[in-house]
Image (cartoon, grey):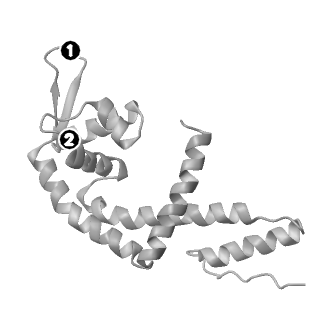
Amino acid sequence: MTPEPVLPTSTRFISTRALLSRIRADWQRARPGLDPSPMLTYLLLDRLHAALERQVNRTYAPAGLNPATWDLLLTLRRSSPPGGLTPTELAQLTAISGASITNRIARLLARGLIERQLSEHDRRSSRVRLSRQGLALADELLPRHLENERQIFGALGDTELVLLEELAGRLLASLESADPT
């Protein structure tokens, strides 16, 4: 009989390797013959996502931004013509719902990081663009953000990064084609 993997006694942190090993052993004990590999792969990717998010948040959190508002600032910085983008265009470029865009816009408007201009032809329509302050903040944080992401992926070589992108892209395309919403 294989001994049960020992987890650290500290409740603060359990390495993902130790956790996956423990879960695999627990399933073998609870349901011998069951292959928990899909669950373990999902858990690995879920923990990877959480770790990536924590690391990336370090770039913009000190500026009082969250992932949603940072995404909107970056989208406006890279994709907005001088006249701005409509909330619908922003939703398409960020792949989020209209209600979420409205919330993000309101937060950034309150901070003076974006400007909204109502349409002369239809008062229900508006365009959003970065304010001077928003442009300055995006340009200040962007180099740090990119360097942070370079460091994150620095653990992988160029060939490994290409393979990671290919595999992740293939998995995502499969999931998106199965559920296009």
Q: Is residue 50 visible?
A: no
Q: Is residue 153 left or right of residue 3?
A: left
Q: Are marks 1 and 2 in contact (CB under 8 Å)?
A: no
For residue 74, above or below residue 42: above
The secondary element bearing badge 2 is classed as loop
Q: Position of residue 50 (x, y in %)?
A: 49, 62
Q: Which residue is mark 2?
A: 80
Q: Residues within 10 Å of mark 1 (few under 14, many from 20)?
A: few
Q: Position of residue 29 (x, y in %)?
A: 87, 72
Q: Position of residue 27 (x, y in %)?
A: 82, 68
Q: Is residue 160 left or right of residue 16?
A: left
For residue 124, above or below residue 131: above
Query: Residue at 30% across / 37% down in the picture?
Result: 90
Query: Residue at 64% across / 82% down in the picture?
Result: 8
Q: Is residue 70 visible?
A: yes
Q: Between label 1 and label 2, give the one nearer the viewer.
A: 2
Q: Is residue 170 left or right of residue 161?
A: right
Q: Which mark is drawn over residue 175? A: none
Q: CA distance from mark 1 to mark 2?
A: 20 Å
Query: Residue at 34% across / 52% down in the picture?
Result: 66
The disc labelled 1 sits on which kind of residue? Answer: Asp
The secondary element bearing badge 1 is classed as loop
The disc labelled 2 sits on which kind of residue? Answer: Ser
Q: Which residue is mark 1?
A: 122
Query: Residue at 68% across / 72% down in the picture?
Result: 20
Q: Quadrant of residue 97?
A: top left
Q: How many marks?
A: 2
Q: Quadrant of residue 113?
A: top left
For the N terminus, give its image quadrant: bottom right
